[in-house]
Image: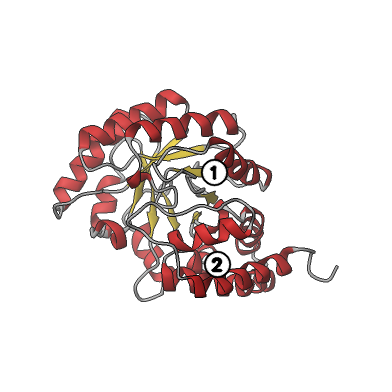
Amino acid sequence: MSLFTGLSAFPMTPTDATGRLAPELLRAFLKRIVAADAQSIGLLGSTGAYAYLTAEERKRTLGVALESVARRVPVIVGVGALRTDEAADLARDARQAGAEGLLLAPVSYQPLTEDEVFHHFEAVAEAGGLPLCIYNNPGTTKFTFSPDLIGRLAEVPNVVAVKMPPPADGDVAAELARLRACVPESFAIGYSGDWVAKAALQAGADCWYSVVAGLLPGPARALTRAAQTGDRAEAERLDAAFAPLWSLFRDFGSFRVMFALAEFLGQGPLAPPRPVLPIPEATRVRVRAALDAVEAATATPPGA
């Protein structure tokens, strides 16, 4: 089975106001993910606030996480950085520390061309020497990977997967068909944007790169299992329970919402790195209600 399949859970990176890691809290997040039997852990992704951390704190986070997980679940590490040489160094650090895979977004201040992104990925993939997933995140990077560019990169050694955002037209099945025509059969195509997870998995996507699984891995694993095994009724039931949370993610951004969710789960208080601000105080009641809906739907098996 490919590393980039099933449920990939993306934990937050808990830090204090100065950006210093809170290791015990990170271990608590990871313990829940391992217990839920996620297929992989996406460390230092967007949910993990990698862009706000120094290289030293990223390295420290990696060390704590790998020691805590102890290879019970494969760890995929985000290595995005403004400069190619910095991203390559982060990729080497990940390999040397014992990570199993890499996730790379084309972080940049200057708008990038397709050739610039291609050569950036080629260099980082070579430096890391690990299976690498393309992170197509135009909402953050302002760069959109075309199917043709994904196809070019799929021929680069070590580039074996892509993490896609929700399609603009909502038609995951059609987009999957277009992408499958551009890449080798073994190339894994997965989706972020938790609100499209059910549709993507039912359409045949290989992986759900999940924000919510960083804090609620059990319910997310249940939804993944139902969608992938063809249990449409159960997938619909679970996705409906998540719907208030999906709405919050779309309204405020999942990154902000996760900080409030962590506090309601007794894993805080935590605050996003400035200049990002917490969600409005008046919205917290919606987060509490959304959490209650998920916990009620997954407390006991249906029909029990």
Give residue 57's position: percent from left, percent from top.
39, 34
Q: Which residue is mark 1?
A: 40
Q: Which residue is mark 2?
A: 198
- Asked whether 283 or 230 is in front, the reply is 283
Position of residue 149 relative to residue 80, above or below, is: below
Give residue 304's position: percent from left, percent from top.
86, 67
Mark 1: secondary structure: strand
Q: Quadrant of the N terminus?
A: top right
- Asked whether 34 or 14 is in front, the reply is 14
Tell me the quarter of the picture where residue 219 sits.
Answer: bottom right
Marks 1 and 2, the one that precedes in the sequence: 1
Mark 2: secondary structure: helix
- The dot on residue 146 is none
Left or right relative to 292: residue 93: left
Give residue 181's position: percent from left, percent from top.
34, 58
Q: How many marks?
A: 2
